[in-house]
Every structure is written in structure tokens, then in C-alpha cells.
Image (cartoon, rainbow, N blue to C red):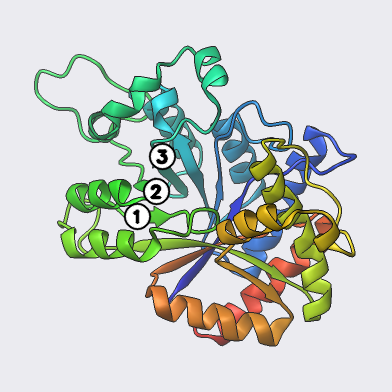
Amino acid sequence: MVAYSVLDLAHIVEGATPSDALANTRALAQACERFGYTRYWLAEHHNMIGIASAATSVVIGDVAAATKTIRVGAGGIMLPNHSPLVIAEQFGTLDALYPGRIDLGLGRAPGTDQRTLRALRRSPEAADTFPQDVVELQTLLGAPQPGQFVHAVPGEGSNVPLWILGSSVFGAQLAAVLGLPYAFASHFAPDALFAALKFYRDGFKPSRQLEKSYAMVGVNVIAAHSDAEARRLFTSVQQAFTGMVRGTRGRLQPPIDDIESYWSAAEKTHASHMLTYAIVGGPETIRRELGTFAEKTAADELMVVSAIYDHAARVRSYELVAEICKSLGA
């Protein structure tokens, strides 16, 4: 059985505001709860005019308040940007408000550029202590230890489930050693997917949180009533990834009729490579390709990423994907 979940980057689309984006996030989470998704995650990014989830724990609280049963969490918190104590307190508070529904995915990247990292008052070297910081955070969320002088309140004893996020074998090895679930970001960094999964599964050591390995894999999915309609919706994603190549990130753009006139040959090659694991089409195409992807990765859970300009079309895409996942036995 493969679980299916949502990663929402809270995109601010062209012509809209952060308030619009957050309202759409809230509405999409409510819809995905009805559709049967397992969890709904949000990600920490800073200094990006097209993403509204910089204050990730705040947005998680808003989504959790607007839903009832779906798990809500971070995919992820960029731990080098914070002290473990602050994150333990934030997610301990979320768990106290919404017990048994909060996840805490942790990433090692800053989620921003070097200038913004300095504005966060963090050193680029902070990533070097990521493994120790994860262990410290785990300790703060666990039962108090003899001689412990610093306590996370709320947080202590909550044992909020931790996940390690990654796009390389480093995160896979760390998750394996610590016995934590692992989520691979193949929706934008495809190269190390299978190597990372092998490192994780081969090296996994059981822990108090997890008895056996559990791997989640991110995948872009744009579903519509027809292949042609889905391909047109997908041009918003293609424009966004072209912007990454150009170093000009912005708001999510409306779809266009001819993507070939938008990007150069080199930009197409680079952006399309990052989008290697993008499944785009009508119901039959999605059913076939998503089933193949799940089989090849042997993922325990699929994290579906759907950046679609029109909110109604995005909700419909997630509805179609949920119907297909159920038909696949997910």
C-alpha cells in the first residue's frame, strides 16, 4: 500500500497577493482532506516573491486549524536557519494545539541565497552541524533526561515525528543512521533518487520512532481531463523552472500556448532535466505513469507537487490524482 500526500509551496501567482495564496492553501488543504490524502506539508523559503510560506510554522498552524484529520507538517524546516530549541518549542506548541497531527521534516539547505542567509543572522557553516542539531532537537522533543537544564515547553515529551529531507545521499545516510523516515526531493532534484533510496534502505537502523525504513518520494503531477489540457497547465511549472535557470525567480505565471517560444534550447535542457519526474496528462496517462513511478521507486509514500496557476484547476488535479491513487490500491 502506497500512501499519497501533498507538498504545497503556497505559490503566489501573478496578479495575486500573499493573502490570496494563503487562502488558497487553506482551501486546498480542506479539499485534500476530503480526497483522502495522508498529510499536507509546507516548505520554508525566504526572500522569494512567489512563495508565501516563509513563516512555515505559522502557516502549518493555520492549515491545521482549518482541517480536522489530515496530518500537517513541514516539508521542511531548514534547520540551519534556526536553533533546535526554537523549533522544538514551535512544533511542540503545534502538537499541543493539534495533537497527533503534526510532522516535522528537516532540511540541511538554507532555503535561500547567501545574502538572505546573512539577513537571517545565520552562518553558512551552520549546515555543518546539521546531524548534531537533529539529535539535539530529537532530545528536546523527547522525555527529559537526568541533568538536563534546558527544556522545550511546550515540546518536551511530545515526540513530534521527525523526517529527514534530502536531494543527495547525505540525508539518506543520516536518516538511516538515526532510524528516521526519509523524503527525497525528486520533484526538483532527480539525479540521486535511486542511489539515495538504496543508501537509506541498506543502512537503516531501527529506532524508537521507526522499526523499518520508510521512504517518501516527491513527484510533480499535473492532472486534467485530457493530456493536452494538462500539458498547457504544466507550462506554468516549465516557466518557473526556466526562471530558476535564468536566476530570475518570480510569481507563478499563467499557462501559455507555446512553451518552445519561451525558453532557449539550453534552458529547455536544464529545466526539463530538473523536471525529469513530472507526470503530466489526463487520467489514463497519470494512472499509467504514476503506477510505474511508484513501482520503480518502491516508495512507501508519494508526495504530490502540483504547481498550477488556476486554483480551481489545481484542486481538480489533486482530486483526479486521489481518485487514481485509490484505483491503484494506494
- Whether residues under marks 3 and 1 lie with C-beta atoms below 8 angstroms apart, the answer is no
Where residue 276 sits, quadrant-wise, is bottom right
Q: CA distance from mark 3 to mark 2?
A: 7 Å
Report which residue position mark 3 lands on. 107
- Whether residues under marks 2 and 1 lie with C-beta atoms below 8 angstroms apart, the answer is yes
Residue 166's disc is 2
Task: Please provide percent x and percent y for residue 254.
Answer: 86, 53
Label 3: few (<14), some or many (≥20) within 10 Å? many
Task: Please provide percent x and percent y for residue 181.
Answer: 32, 55
- The answer to whether 215 appears left or right of 75 in the picture is left
- The answer to whether 113 appears left or right of 316 in the picture is left
Report which residue position mark 1 lands on. 182
- The answer to whether 276 appears left or right of 16 in the picture is left
Secondary-structure class at tag 3: strand
Q: Is residue 1 visible?
A: no
Residue 287 vertical position relative to residue 13 in the rendered view, above or below: below
Where residue 63 sits, quadrant-wise, is top right
Residue 87 vertical position relative to residue 272 in the rendered view, above or below: above
- Whether residues under marks 3 and 2 lie with C-beta atoms below 8 angstroms apart, the answer is yes
Q: CA distance from mark 3 to mark 1?
A: 11 Å
Task: Please provide percent x and percent y for residue 208.
Answer: 18, 51
Residue flagged by tag 2: what amino acid is it?
Gly
Label 2: few (<14), some or many (≥20) within 10 Å? many
In this rendering, which labeled residue sits more in front, label 2 or label 1?
A: 2
- The answer to whether 86 appears left or right of 268 in the picture is left
Residue flagged by tag 3: what amino acid is it?
Gly
